[in-house]
Image (cartoon, rainbow, N blue to C red):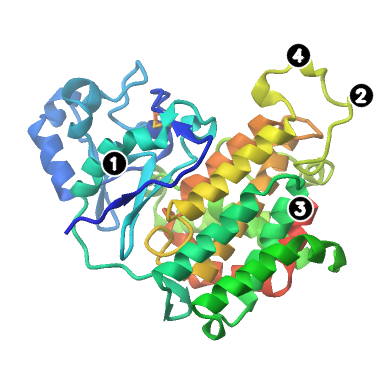
C-alpha cells in the first residue's frame, strides 16, 4: 500500500528548477540497478565513447569529469540524458532532487534540499504544485514496512506526539515580534531542554503540556540564563562539526590517490580545523582565510556600520546585509527540515526525535559559523545574504546524506554540546 503524500505548508517557500546545473556539478550520484539498466538501453557508452559509471565500495556511481561535474552534463549546462530522453529517463536520484521523501508510519513527508539555489532563493512555483511529480516519484520507491519514529532512545513516538513537537517548534520559529537573536537562541534552549529531559516521563498529553510550558517560558527564561562565552572546547567541537559538513570527497580523487593517502590527507585537514589557528585548509566554495580573521567578523544579525560596508545602493540584493531576508531564509530552512521529515527518523539516519533535533541545531550553528567564514574570505567584516545562502546550501547538502554524520562520534558531539549548554552559548555568539 502506498502512503499518502504530506507536503508541508511552508508559506513563502517556492521552487522550480531553473536549470542552473549546480546539482550536476556538486553531487556524486549513486545509481540503482534499474538506473543502470535504463542507461545501458539508452546506449550511453557508445554515445559518450567512454564508461559513465564507476564502482566504489560496492556501489555504482555516475562518473565525474576532471572538474567534478557529472559525465552527463553537457557544455550547454544541461543534462544530456534529460535532453535526449526526458526527465523520467534519468537516474532516480536526479529525478527526485531537490525533493527528499521520508516515509514513516502514516505518510511520506516531502522535504526539500537547500543545496538547490532555487530553493534557497525561494524562486518558482508553490511546493503544492509539485504534488503530481512527487506522487510519481514516491511510486518509484520500493514499498517498505511502516517506519516508526523514536522519541528518545527506544521509545516509539505516537503520531500525536510527533505532530505536537512539529507544531510547537514551528510556532516558535514563526513567532512574530521577536528578534532573530531571540528566535535562534530560544530554539537552542528548547532543543537543549528536550535533549536533557527524560521524555519517558512525559508521554502523550504531558509532552504537549511540557512543550507549551517551554515555548511560553522561553522569552522570559532567556534573560535569566547564564550567558558566558562558549568554552574553547565548544568552539573546537563546532569547527570539527563544520569540517564534517564541508568535507567533499570526490570518488575520482579517492580512487586516484588511494585509500591510505586519502585518509591521511583527511586526517591532516581535520586536525587543522580542530586547531582553528593559521590558514584554513582548502575548501570547495570558500577562500582559505586566517582563522583570526573569522574572529573579527561580526555576528550574522549584527548591523553593519555605514562607514564600513559599501553604500547599500551599490550592492545587489544578495550581497546586502538584509536581516529580514536572512531571518526568512533560516526560518524556511529549519521549518522545512522539521516539517519535511528531515529532522529525525527515515529522513535523518533513523535518529530519535531528540537527537535529530540536536543535529539540526548543530547544522544551524555550523551554517552561522560558515556564513562569517565566507564573509571573512571576501575580506568583509559584516556578513551578507549571499554569505548565508552559500553556507546554508553547503551545510544542507550533507544533511541526511553524508554517512559520517550518522556515526557515534557525531552523536557524542551533539550530546556534549547540549549537556554543557554550549548549543545556546554558541547560538548567542554567532547571531
Ligand atoms: S540546483 Fe536546483 S535549479 Fe539548479 S539544476 Fe539543480 S534542481 Fe535545477
Residue 390, image quadrant? top right
Element type at mark 1: helix
Provide residue 264's location: percent of width, then percent of height: 52, 58
Tell us which disc is closer to us: 1 or 2: 1
- Left or right for 96, reference 201: left
Helix, strand or loop for disc 4: helix
Residue 134 numbered tag: 1
Q: Which mark is residue 150?
A: none
Q: On residue 182, which mark appears?
A: 3
Q: Residues within 10 Å of mark 1 (few under 14, many from 20)?
A: many
Where 162 falls versus 309 (above or below)?
Answer: below
The front one of 101 and 51 is: 101
Report the front residue among 380 and 130. Answer: 130
- Give the class, few, some or many, for how many residues have Cα within 10 Å of label 2's Cα (few <14, many ≥20): few
Q: Position of residue 328 (x, y in %)?
A: 63, 38
The residue depicted at 50 percent of the width and 47 percent of the height is 336
Q: CA distance from mark 2 to mark 4?
A: 14 Å
* Figure quadrant of the N terminus: bottom left
Amino acid at each position: 500500500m502506498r502512503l499518502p503524500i504530506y507536503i508541508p505548508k511552508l508559506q513563502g517557500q517556492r521552487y522550480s528548477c531553473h536549470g542552473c546545473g549546480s546539482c550536476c556539478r556538486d553531487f556524486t550520484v549513486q545509481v540503482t540497478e534499474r538506473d543502470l539498466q535504463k542507461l545501458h538501453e539508452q546506449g550511453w557508452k557508445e554515445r559518450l565513447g567512454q564508461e559513465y559509471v564507476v564502482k566504489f565500495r560496492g556501489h555504482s556511481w555516475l562518473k565525474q569529469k576532471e572538474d567534478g561535474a557529472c559525465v552527463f552534463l553537457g557544455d550547454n549546462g544541461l543534462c544530456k540524458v534529460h535532453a535526449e530522453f526526458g526527465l523520467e529517463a534519468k537516474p532516480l536520484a536526479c529525478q527526485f532532487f531537490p525533493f527528499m521523501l521520508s516515509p514513516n508510519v502514516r505518510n511520506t513527508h516531502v522535504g526539500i534540499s537547500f543545496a538547490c539555489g532555487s530553493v534557497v532563493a525561494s524562486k518558482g512555483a508553490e511546493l503544492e504544485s509539485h504534488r503530481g511529480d512527487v506522487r510519481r516519484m514516491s511510486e518509484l520507491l520500493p514499498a517498505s514496512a511502516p517506519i516508526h519514529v523514536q522519541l528518545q532512545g527506544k521509545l516509539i513516538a505516537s503520531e500525536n506526539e510527533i505532530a505536537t513537537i512539529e507544531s510547537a517548534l514551528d510556532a516558535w520559529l514563526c513567532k512574530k515580534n521577536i528578534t532573530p537573536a531571540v528566535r535562534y537562541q530560544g530554539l537552542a534552549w528548547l532543543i537543549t531542554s528536550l535533549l536533557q529531559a527524560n521524555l519517558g516521563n512525559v508521554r502523550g498529553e504531558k509532552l504537549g503540556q511540557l512543550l507549551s510550558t517551554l515555548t511560553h517560558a522561553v522569552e522570559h527564561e532567556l534573560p535569566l540564563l547564564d550567558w558566558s562565552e562558549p568554552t574553547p572546547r565548544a568552539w573546537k567541537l563546532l569547527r570539527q562539526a563544520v569540517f564534517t559538513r564541508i568535507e567533499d570527497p570526490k570518488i575520482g580523487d579517492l580512487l586516484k590517490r588511494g585509500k591510505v593517502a586519502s585518509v591521511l590527507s583527511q586526517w591532516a585537514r581535520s586536525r587543522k580545523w580542530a586547531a582553528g589557528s593559521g590558514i584554513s585548509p582548502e575548501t570547495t566554495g570558500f577562500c582559505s582565510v586566517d582563522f583570526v580573521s573569522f574572529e573579527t567578523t561580526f555576528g550574522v544579525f549584527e548591523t553593519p556600520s555605514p562607514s564600513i560596508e559599501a553604500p547599500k545602493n551599490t550592492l545587489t540584493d544578495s550581497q546586502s546585509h538584509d536581516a529580514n531576508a536572512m531571518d526568512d531564509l533560516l526560518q524556511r530552512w529549519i521549518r522545512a527540515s522539521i516539517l519535511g521529515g528531515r529532522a529525525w527518523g527515515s529522513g535523518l539516519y533513523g535518529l530519535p526525535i531528540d537527537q535529530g533535533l540536536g543535529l539540526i541545531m548543530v547544522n544551524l550553528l555550523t551554517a552561522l559559523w560558515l556564513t562569517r567564514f565566507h564573509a571573512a574570505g571576501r575580506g568583509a567584516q559584516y556578513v551578507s545574504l549571499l554569505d548565508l545562502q552559500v553556507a546554508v546550501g553547503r551545510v544542507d547538502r550533507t544533511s541526511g546524506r553524508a554517512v559520517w554524520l550518522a556515526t557515534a562520534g557525531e552523536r557524542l558531539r551533539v550530546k556534549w554540546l547540549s549537556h554543557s549548554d554550549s548549543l545556546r552559548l554558541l547560538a548567542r555568539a554567532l547571531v
